[in-house]
């Protein structure tokens, strides 16, 4: 297992749709292990493979209190979202120093291939739902700030660029 480096914004891989995994292999399982170690080292609550430059539809999420309850997802698909929306502060290691309050559905049902290689359906609520949606956005070539208005997005990216220039 290894901590992997993050792809810096505006690398084009962060704007590209990741390729389906299909079948789990030992390489996919090893990549999941690296992703988990990288996520915990951030520290963070979720990570999608494109964030570390791997263009496969893989994600890991762990919003548990003490950590250690990681959900490994391959080829996730959102099947249903709740009507109730909630705001959460979101950020990404691909764009350090920037964050924004994003409004997303409070709950969702997702279909994905789990660590056993079985397609399952799972419901996620609250922070788990936010993180899963955030990771699926990454798999679809979207960043969290794409959910902001054009003005707010421009301000956020300008702030991040200024911080990067200063070396913060």
Image: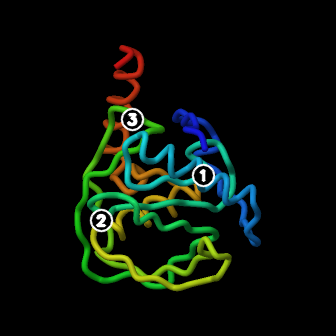
Label 3 neighbour load within 10 Å: few <14, some 14-19, many 20+: some
Picture coordinates of residue 63 (x, y %)?
A: 34, 62
Q: Nearer the viewer, mark 3 or mark 1?
A: 1
C-alpha span from label 2 to label 3: 24 Å
Question: Dots 2 and 3: beta carbons under 8 Å?
Answer: no
Residue tagged by mark 2?
Answer: 127
The quarter in which the N terminus is drawn is top right
Numbered tag placed on residue 157 in the rendering: 3
Residue drawn at x 59%, y 42% is 52
Sequence-wise, which precedes: disc 2 or disc 3? Answer: 2
Residue drawn at x 64%, y 70% is 75
Residue drawn at x 37%, y 77% is 124
Horizontal side of 84 relative to 91 (left or right) equals left
Element class at badge 2? helix
Residue tagged by mark 1?
Answer: 49
Q: Nearer the viewer, residue 73 or 108?
A: 73
Picture coordinates of residue 76 (x, y %)?
A: 57, 72
C-alpha span from label 3 to label 1: 22 Å
């Amino acid at each position: 297992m290894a901590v992997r480096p993050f792809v810096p914004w505006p690398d084009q891989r962060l704007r590209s749709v990741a390729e389906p995994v299909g079948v789990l292999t030992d390489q996919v399982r090893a990549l999941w292990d690296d992703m988990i170690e990288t996520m915990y080292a951030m520290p963070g609550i979720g990570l999608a493979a494109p964030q570390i430059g791997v263009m496969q539809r893989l994600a890991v999420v762990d919003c548990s209190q003490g950590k250690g309850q990681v959900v490994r997802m391959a080829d996730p698909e959102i099947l249903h979202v709740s009507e109730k929306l909630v705001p959460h502060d979101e950020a990404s290691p691909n764009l350090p120093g920037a964050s924004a309050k994003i409004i997303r559905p409070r709950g969702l049902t997702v279909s994905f291939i789990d660590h056993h290689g079985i397609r399952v359906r799972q419901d996620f609520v609250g922070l788990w739902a936010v993180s899963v949606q955030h990771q699926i956005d990454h798999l679809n070539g979207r960043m969290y700030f794409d959910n902001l208005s054009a003005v707010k997005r421009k301000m956020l990216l300008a702030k991040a660029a200024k911080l990067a220039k200063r070396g913060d």
